Image (spheres, grey):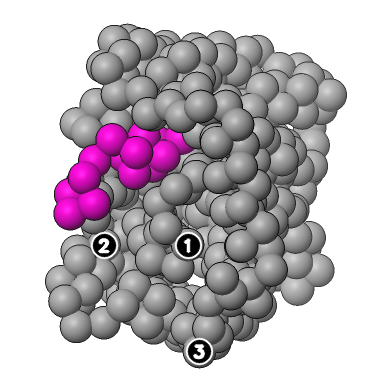
């Protein structure tokens, strides 16, 4: 569990959160628009989403040891190669690799390992521990990336991050996960269980409401993760200050996960999560109004950050409570695919909105999407489970 906590922190930091910091210097040197650069990130998330179901099936059938070890190596290579791109096709090709690696090493397979090897009474604590650690990814890696870029330039900064990712994650996945394989079952029984789990989810209207909620929320948080640095710079903040304020998302996401754990004694995960989604909508709607002042920006970012990583910890709990733990990775992969597709197109949509209406107005649609996520998740609780 400790190994997964560390590798998820490094993985999310290097493969996901740093992109917004590299967006401007990379775009300037390559002579392309930020929308074009953001498209590369969209490609990575899209590839990751498309691979969610096959990755889930692989983990259910074979375990995660080899998959996550190979994915860590592929991710490290991808980040180092990213530092050498000279053209848009090269940039997009690299992010195909990074997207494939992300599907192999981030929350999906990691959570499947925890669900499979931990006893039911320990699952919630295990998921909380890993997501609490990973919640520091943006807090650590966004300011660190800004500092590295200022010191050595964006290309050398990527080399350092890629080598650091390799040094930490490959040995841990290769050695520590050796004894944490997902339990196997006979092939025929495995296939029947997997297919029945998927069929139950697909014919359940509540599943589609849950999916819609996480699709909306995933799109909103991805726009904020990728564009918040540029949004704050547009308000007049220096790049390092903008990166530091953005890093508050990670700190507050930890508080949000602790709030979920504490309130779980009285409310179910769906109720808590829906309320946090609505609170995020209020915070991000207020940010263009009060964001010119550092205190106002910090308060809005803090509140939005409470729900920033909430989907990571509540998705497994919501799915397990509704469909059981059997074949969890496959069912989670089915939900993850449209969510990741939404995340893939969200940064490009945010960039196009910023060009069309400016960064201040871009945050209003993000707020609306957060409200929609909260409403959908609340409605899902009212729908009976289809057996």
Give the class, few, some or many, for how many residues have Cα within 10 Å of label 1's Cα (few <14, many ≥20). Answer: many
Q: Tell me, yes or no, if residue 99 can be seen here.
A: no
Quarter occupied by the N terminus: top left
Q: In the drawing, does residue 94 fall left or right of residue 248? A: right
Q: Is residue 338 above or below residue 220?
A: above
Q: CA distance from mark 3 to mark 1?
A: 16 Å
Of badges 2 and 1, the one in the foreground is 1
Q: Nearer the viewer, residue 108 or 361?
A: 108
* Residue that mark 3 sits on: 382
Q: Please tell me which of labels 3 and 2 falls first in the chain.
A: 2
Of badges 3 and 1, the one in the foreground is 1
Q: Nearer the viewer, residue 160 or 213?
A: 213
Residue for point 32% across, 68% down: 306
Q: Any magenta on residue 115?
A: yes
Give residue 378's position: percent from left, percent from top: 49, 85
Classified by dominant secondary structure, the portion drawn in magenta counts as: helix
């Amino acid at each position: 569990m400790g190994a997964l906590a560390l590798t998820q922190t490094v993985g999310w930091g290097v493969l996901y959160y740093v992109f917004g910091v590299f967006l401007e210097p990379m775009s300037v040197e390559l002579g392309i628009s930020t929308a074009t650069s953001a498209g590369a990130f969209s490609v990575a998330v899209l590839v990751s989403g498309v691979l969610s179901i096959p990755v889930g099936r692989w983990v259910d059938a074979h375990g995660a040891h080899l998959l996550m070890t190979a994915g860590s190596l592929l991710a490290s290579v991808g980040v180092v190669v990213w530092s050498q791109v000279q053209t848009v096709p090269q940039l997009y090709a690299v992010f195909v690799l990074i997207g494939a690696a992300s599907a192999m090493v981030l929350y999906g397979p990691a959570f499947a390992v925890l669900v499979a090897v931990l006893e039911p009474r320990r699952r919630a604590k295990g998921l909380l521990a890993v997501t609490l650690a990973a919640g520091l990814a943006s807090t650590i890696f966004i300011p660190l990336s800004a500092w590295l870029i200022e010191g050595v330039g964006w290309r050398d900064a990527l080399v350092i991050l890629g080598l650091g990712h390799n040094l930490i994650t490959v040995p841990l996945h290769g050695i520590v996960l050796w004894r944490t394989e997902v339990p196997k079952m006979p092939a025929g029984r495995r296939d029947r269980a997997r297919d029945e789990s998927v069929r139950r989810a697909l014919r359940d209207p509540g599943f589609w409401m849950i999916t819609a909620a996480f699709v909306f929320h995933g799109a909103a948080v991805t726009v904020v993760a990728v564009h918040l640095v540029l949004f704050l710079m547009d308000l007049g903040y220096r790049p390092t200050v903008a990166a530091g304020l953005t890093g508050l998302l990670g700190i507050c996401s930890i508080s949000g996960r602790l709030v979920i754990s504490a309130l779980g004694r009285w409310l179910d995960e769906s109720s808590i999560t829906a309320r946090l989604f609505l609170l995020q909508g209020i915070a991000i709607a207020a940010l263009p109004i009060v964001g010119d002042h550092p205190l106002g920006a910090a308060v809005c970012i803090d509140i939005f950050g409470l729900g920033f990583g909430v989907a990571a910890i509540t998705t497994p709990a919501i799915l397990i409570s509704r469909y059981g733990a059997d074949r969890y990775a496959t069912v989670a992969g089915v939900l993850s695919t449209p969510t990741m597709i939404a995340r893939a197109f969200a940064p490009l949509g945010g960039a196009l909105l910023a060009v069309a209406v400016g960064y201040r107005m871009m945050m209003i649609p993000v707020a609306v999407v957060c409200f929609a996520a909260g409403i959908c998740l609340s409605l899902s609780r009212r729908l009976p489970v289809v057996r």
